[in-house]
Amino acid sequence: MQFRLEALGRWTPESSLFVGEDTILAYAEATNDGPAAALGGRIAPPVFAIVPVWERLQEAAQAVAPEEVRDRVVHGDQDIFISTPIEAGMTLRARAAAVGLHVKDSGTTVVLKTETRDEGGRLLNEQYVTEFYRGVTGGDGAGEAAPDHRIPKEIAGAEPSAAITYPIDADQTFRYAEASNDDHAIHLDEEAARAAGLPGIIVHGLCLMAFAGRAVLESQGEEDPGAVRRLAVRFSRPMAPGDALTTRIRPLDGPGTGFDAVDGAGEVVLKDGLLELDDASRGSP
């Protein structure tokens, strides 16, 4: 069972998406993002960046990973670098490529990269998505590693400076699936989720990432979602709808803010979280 190394670095064709205020507003409402919704859909929240690249991302993953291992994949990391926030009225051009494959004793990691540009070719954001194929080993690896966003252990284990809890609605996954186009059955169908080894429907990891990012902004008194320049997390554990997500914020020695998030039982759901703001929001001269 071999991954296709020859597909590394091969970009998908570009897709095009016109972003209206209704599209942005639907995503903000699907992630319970009051501050973004209050802007009337004019500026997209940071995790909205997944919407224009979603289909291209699936295409890039399928190009390198054989179909027979796709049911073993879990979403490992998401790292979003934002040069310019997405705004209503933009026509976006998006593409993706698998850029790295790394074989471990426990499975194989595939690193995917996406680019989103405006109609004039200006780069708006890049994303690195890490997929982990459980128990699939053997063969050679090649290509890039994803950028590092690990939080130092002494900081990750420290008392948080703030902790903010948001409830996850019972219908959250259905609303998020519609707004994001991520309609994977484990988020919508109890039987399919249990067949995949889960206790039931689980919340989309990117929805949880959006919740956590908003909590970090709230902790800093920042109401502008367009101020975010980097948002990264590692997905640690699935979470069920109807629970509550608590984001624990910890300042870092360098740029950015570290965070993790736990479910109602105190189990870590997101770890190695990192959020960086633009210079103006950081108060730089």
Image: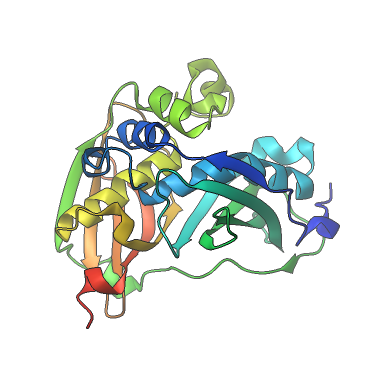
Above or below: residue 211 compared with residue 231? above
Q: Is residue 139 left or right of residue 94?
A: right
Q: Which residue appears farthest toward the bottom when viewing the image?
A: 285
Residue nearest the observer in this picture, 141 or 112: 112
Residue nearest the observer in this picture, 200 or 78: 78
**Image coords of residue 125 (percent x, y):** 50, 59
**Image coords of residue 206 (percent x, y):** 43, 43
Q: Is residue 201 left or right of residue 172?
A: right
The residue at the point 34 percent across, 34 percent down is 25
Above or below: residue 110 compared with residue 29? below
The residue at the point 18 percent across, 53 percent down is 218
Scheme by which the image is coloured? rainbow
The quarter of the image holding the C terminus is bottom left
The quadrant holding residue 263 is: top left
**Image coords of residue 213 (percent x, y):** 31, 52
**Image coords of residue 155 (percent x, y):** 27, 71
Q: Is residue 8 left or right of residue 118?
A: right
The residue at the point 74 percent across, 55 percent down is 11
The quadrant holding residue 170 is: top left
The residue at the point 62 percent across, 43 percent down is 16
